[in-house]
Amino acid sequence: MSDSPLSTSALAKALGKTTKQMFAELETLCWIERADDSWKLTSKGEFEGGSYRESQKFGRYIIWPSTVVSHNALSNADSHLLTSTKLAKFFSFTRKQIDQILVELGWVLPSRKGWLVTKQGELEGGCQRENINTAVPYVLWPSEITNNIVLKRSIEELAADNFICCDGHKVSSVQEQKIDNWLYFSGLLHAYQRRLPFEEKYLSDFYLPQYHLYIEYWGEGNTPSQLPEKMSKKEQIVQAGFKLIELDDQDIESLDEVLPRKLLKFGIEV
């Protein structure tokens, strides 16, 4: 790294953080403080090597020695914060499930390759970060987030064994619950147990009305007595020329790979 002094924005980039987060962190460390509409160095900030530079374009701004990049207070500042991977491990969930919950709560938004913290997420302690090598944004959370009542409620609802889905649908098996939650978190409008347009009173497992597409689950989540009706139902769906996706127990274990591929066959991108 060059020995040239770093502006605060350059320091943020070197540490893989956003400029906003860098200023907030330096303020927390009492290296800088807000004065009117600008930042000024504190005596501690001056002790750490901070100084001022004058620019015709930017006016007066703070610069830091390049050695401050390896300062323990900055390099270890994130050690107490949690990634979504660590949150997933804490709650015994997958990282994707945690990311989905955070999106549903309105705490993060997906970017093209990463995650952006929302205003509500910041209020809950979310900190925006950026990978120094790939520039992919991600979010870190304070350790106390594991006790957040709203988050814990969402976790409990998803983990409940009464087969109530995140969108309120009450299904008949854990397999159907996984399908329903996958559709919900993927933003796909769907109905559960919708009556099919036949004389017989058949009910579809899932129906996507925008695409006139039915999804039927075959597996251990069905009782033996249901199978004859399901076979007859499938036959009529096929004869009517309706769009149909079928899922079995093996598919349930890899919905993230299976369902996007099956949906794409009907021109539906997720």
Image: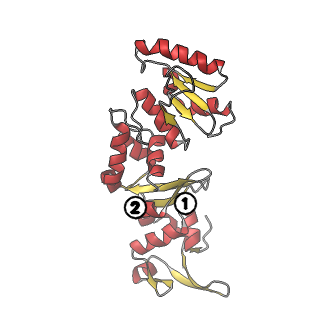
Residue 265 lies, in percent from the top left, at 68, 30
Is residue 218 among what the camera can see? Answer: yes
Residue type, label 1: Gly
Residue 65 lies, in percent from the top left, at 54, 74
Q: Residue at x 50, y 79 (%)?
A: 50
Residue 208 vs 115, above or below: the answer is above
User: Which-is-in-front pick, marks 1 and 2?
Assistant: 2
Q: Is residue 73 left or right of residue 247?
A: left
- Identify the residue under disc 2: 125
Residue 95 vs 228, above or below: the answer is below
Is residue 68 among what the camera can see? Answer: no
Q: Residue at x 59, y 53 (%)?
A: 111
Residue 46 lies, in percent from the top left, at 45, 81
Q: Quadrant of residue 198?
A: top right
* Label 1 Cα crowd, 10 Å radius (few <14 / some 14-19 / many 20+): many
Assign the N terminus to one quadrant of the image. Answer: bottom right
Q: Secondary structure at mark 2?
A: loop
Residue type, label 2: Gly
Q: Quadrant of residue 132?
A: bottom right
Residue 230 lies, in percent from the top left, at 50, 17
- Identify the residue under disc 1: 16
* Label 2 Cα crowd, 10 Å radius (few <14 / some 14-19 / many 20+): some
Give the mark nearer the N terminus: 1 vs 2. Answer: 1
Q: Is residue 253 left or right of residue 13?
A: left
Q: Is residue 188 left or right of residue 181?
A: right
Depth check: give the residue in front, 197 or 251: 197
